[in-house]
Amino acid sequence: MRHLKLTRRTFGRTALGAAAAAALTAGLPAFAAGGDYPRKLRIGSTAPGHLKFVVFRNLGLLEKAFADEGVEVEYLTFDGGSAASVALGSGQLDLMYTGNNPALRLAASGADVKAIGLSAWVPQNDTLVIVPTDSAPQTLGDLKGRRVAYLVGTVRHSVFSKALASVGLSTADVESFNFGIENSGPAMSRGDIDAIVESSGVAQKLVDAGAARVLFDASGNPEWSVPYIITGNGGFLRQYPQVATRLLEEDIRLAKWVDAHPEETIGIFVKETGNAEKSVRATYKDDVFYQDPEITDAAVEALKGEEAFMAANGLIKGKVDYDAWIDRSFYAAAVAGLAAAPGTY
């Protein structure tokens, strides 16, 4: 398998408008200081960013939430969840919003991290397999022996593995290239690869431009959907538990706000990520965004099922200790804090 060096990029916040931010933050209570706060809160996400991460950044909501304590909020995106996981495990990140596969691998490695909430649990898988418009393959089975690009270790890798398994194949039956879209798109146009596995928001743009067609759409397989995770560095959480609690308070508010403001949410997400609006609307069908951060028992079972699939397909080393990894205390504290200030979200 060919690999490209994974890179990290830092994005600043871009404001969509004062009205949107004011609608979310109006009437918010002043939080009790209680304990020391870090000079900087470093939050990461897989590029181009999970929905709540993107909206937080765009509207400056976390900056407002921590303004009284003078905490600077830094948003970092990573080309692949594995790179974000390395940063979190090493202490270069405090909190991260990533897919389930990177989060599970990090937990299975024995790293000092905790799952404190869900980034999202969207029923519509947003993975597409695309091929050049005039290419021969018509089905997944036709990819046997062909050159396929995807980022290794991502949720898309897992979904592609499940898709191949549904037709009796595995990733061992294709020639895999560890490319992100910035390299796989040009490579496919040159004829260097035969297919790309990517998120629908990115892949759809090539389809709309007439440069590719959809070979397989995973949105028809909701049974493959597994929650995305908010993970925290253990040392950071022990030193600054009040920061994680407050972040989840804002996360809960935002999860409710996006469902109440679907057009504004889609506008922000499309503008910030560059994803195709058609694909974004297809992912968040009926203007429901599935952003509730609560880690339910059903979510845990889905994660366990995903871990078992990853283990069976050589996508994970070690085993996750769910009792040690999942920490619902921050969510419980956030709910209690919001209950003490009714009507603010």
Image: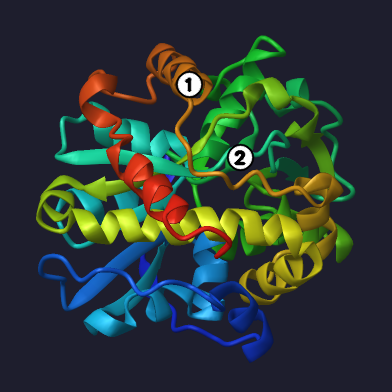
The answer for how far apart the CA atoms under marks 1 and 2 are is 23 Å
334 vs 119, nearest the viewer: 334
- The image position of residue 208, as x and y in percent, is 87, 62
Mark 2 neighbour density, 10 Å: few (under 14) some (14–19) many (20 or more): many
- State which quadrant residue 173 falls in: top right
* Residue under pointer 2: 148
Name which residue lies at 73% across and 37% down.
Answer: 124
- Residue at the spot 45% in from the left edge and 36% down from the top edge: 100
Give residue 306's mark: 1
Callouts 1 and 2 close, C-beta under 8 Å: no
**Which image quarter holds the C terminus?**
bottom right
- Which residue occupies the foreground of this view, 153 or 239? 239
Rendered image: mark on residue 13: none
- Let me know if residue 50 appears in the view: no
Examine the rendered structure and indicate whether residue 23 appears above or below residue 155: below
Place residue 145 in its image quadrant: top right
> Which amino acid lies under the numbered mark 1 shown in the image of this protein?
Glu
Tell me which colouring the rendered structure shows.
rainbow
Q: Is residue 285 visible?
A: yes
Classify mark 1: helix, strand or loop.
helix
Q: Please state which of residues 118 and 318 is positioned toward the viewer in this rendering.
A: 118
Query: Closest to the observer: 211 or 269?
Result: 269
Q: Is residue 150 left or right of residue 295?
A: right
**In the depicted structure, whether residue 10 falls above or below residue 126:** below
- Quadrant for the N terminus, please: top left
What amino acid type is highlighted by mark number 2? Val
Residue 80 in the figure: left or right of residue 235: right
Instruction: Name the image quarter holding residue 344.
Output: bottom right
Q: Position of residue 103 (x, y in %)?
A: 36, 38
**Disc 2, SS:** strand
